[in-house]
Image (cartoon, rainbow, N blue to C red):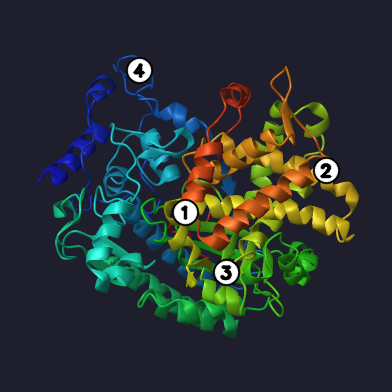
Amino acid sequence: MVRYRSIGLMLSLALAVPAASLVRAQAPNRGPLPAPARPGAQGRPPAPATQPGLPTPTARIGGRPIHNEAKRAARWKVVAMPYSRAGLTTAEQQMIARLADACHQMDEIYLHQSDLGGWAIYHATQNADLYRLFSIDGSRWDLADQNSPIIGEEPLVPGHELYPFGATAAVIERYAAAHPEQRAALYDPWTVVRSAPLDLAPALSQPVVSVADRLYTYPYHEAYAEWVKPMAADLRAAAKLSPDPAFAHYLNLRADALLTDEYRASDIAWMDLKDPKIDLIFGPYETYLDGVLGVKTSYGGAVLLRNDAESRKLAIYRQQEDAMQQALPVPAEDRPSKAGHVAPMEVVDAPLRAGDLRYGYQAVADNLPNDPRIHAEKGSKIVFFKNFMDARVNDVVLPVAQKMLAPDESGDVSSEGYLTTVVLHEISHGLGPAYAHIDSKQIAIDEAIGPAYSGLEEAKADATGIFLAKWLVDRKLLPASELNGVYASFVAGTLRTLRFGTAEAHGRAEMMEFNYLLQHGALAQGADGRYTIDYAAMPAAVASLAQQLLAFEAHGDRAGVEAWFAKYDGMPPTLTRALESTRDIPVDITPEFELARGVRP
């Protein structure tokens, strides 16, 4: 089959083809080869970054260079993420080792969800820079370069490996209309959609470019059973080592959930943990890979070690969640009560992350679970990754601010202000409408909005969080002297994200926000290319933006969202030129975990 042969071509490119021959290399349809031998416990030995005799890199049509893996990889700063055993008993260290084993299995699932062709190359390439790029992006497409191909010429497929190759939202929706009995399974967050039975190799699953005669759906626990079963066994083994009965209970319930795709009971058990010394994010949550329907989840995980002193500082936010919900600029029916929901919040170090928390954009916080039923019943839990936040602020945000903002404004940027923006962003993911209301029906917001949902939700959390900073100051819950620092740190964080471009949900969201603030006079660009902030204009601009984005979610207004982003998410040439001043600053960090495969107590 053509799809099978294409991966053979991709592997040959990764292993041996000189750079000049890549000019004509076309990456056709995807599909896997049988699994190559995996790297050893300590990882693949580094191969030479360049090979003697290779021609000088040239450019493809359109000017994009080829064989520039080293240059691409150099844009990411490697940051060591140590594993501190201080205060951990022997049993706790043994438990963490089993959790780490489960995380390594999760990485394999994620790569199968993201890019089967890339997965094959990742396990076979002898090019150290190419290997590193795959370990950063988790696919053949460069997140920091508008998802341009790292190798070959095949563009990013919006559905990754969650749908048949070539499937679009229109194809799925027309099929669902013709087969209403399959609609629920097609839109299920925990199913893979295929054009062939599960026992047929994905390489033989035919592309779908029009309405298919037959689509198949398979629950994740069947499609990924090869990794799900050992992950569940690792969690059960870890539970036996835990000195915390509540955490052990959660691990056992989560193991059950991995084998059934029924996550509600284990999500509630996770929410009910009381200040756990050791914690774990583990499961399919986020929908960033799904550019077709915007509903399919990808697996993500992190081992968490609690920072008690920093966690106690979050009490003020925990106590105000319902009051903040009621302060939002939307009708009462679109801000359901949060009374009685005291959102668990914790500051942690993450000595290991996996799946969608490991690859690409390095999140500094998480707000989970994403299930609206649990939001209504229990709220959500917010986790702040201190080791990742410190690295981002020191290595990226502050240097970008010094280059991109006028001196007065760059001086207002701080670690404390950035932390406040992140805290309020994550809280705001749990605020606002719980469902969209369309024709008197209650519909999940992500289903109503479709592929644009991820960008919309990130923008809503940004705008709502910055709106609430002013609300907190007005009620003397935050010092008024800190507000300008919050605004400046938010703008600096936005400029940091925009260096990724707008191919990813966060970048698209923040490009829209940036253009909106420019249009409303809260930002302006000086003759020297640097940006100034009109602190007096910020509150009204942020409030109007938050109101509009919350309304989109409340009404499930897919067309309105798509038109809004089309209007606002283009990068102005003046910003593109200004961002050139940051070219020597890393686009982001990439973690190097001490708690890697093979590490034991």
Which residue lies under the disc numbered 3? Answer: 434
Q: Position of residue 473 (x, y in %)?
A: 86, 55
Q: Is residue 197 visible?
A: yes
Q: Is residue 348 visible?
A: no
The type of residue carrying mark 4 is: Ala
Chain-order first, disc 3 or disc 4: 4
Chain-order first, disc 2 or disc 3: 3
Q: CA distance from mark 1 to mark 3?
A: 16 Å
Tell me the crowding category of disc 2: few under 14, some 14 to 19, or many 20 or more residues within 10 angstroms, Cα based.
many
The type of residue carrying mark 3 is: Ala
Q: Position of residue 403 (x, y in %)?
A: 70, 26
The dot on residue 558 is 1
Q: Nearer the viewer, mark 3 or mark 4?
A: 3
Is the Cβ of the residue at disc 3 closer than 8 Å to that at disc 4? no
The type of residue carrying mark 2 is: Asn
Foreground pick, 188 / 549: 549
Chain-order first, disc 4 or disc 2: 4
Residue drawn at x 32%, y 23% as measured from the top left:
51
Which residue lies under the disc numbered 4? Answer: 59
Which residue lies under the disc numbered 2? Answer: 484
Does residue 297 appear to the left or right of 159 in the view shown?
Answer: right
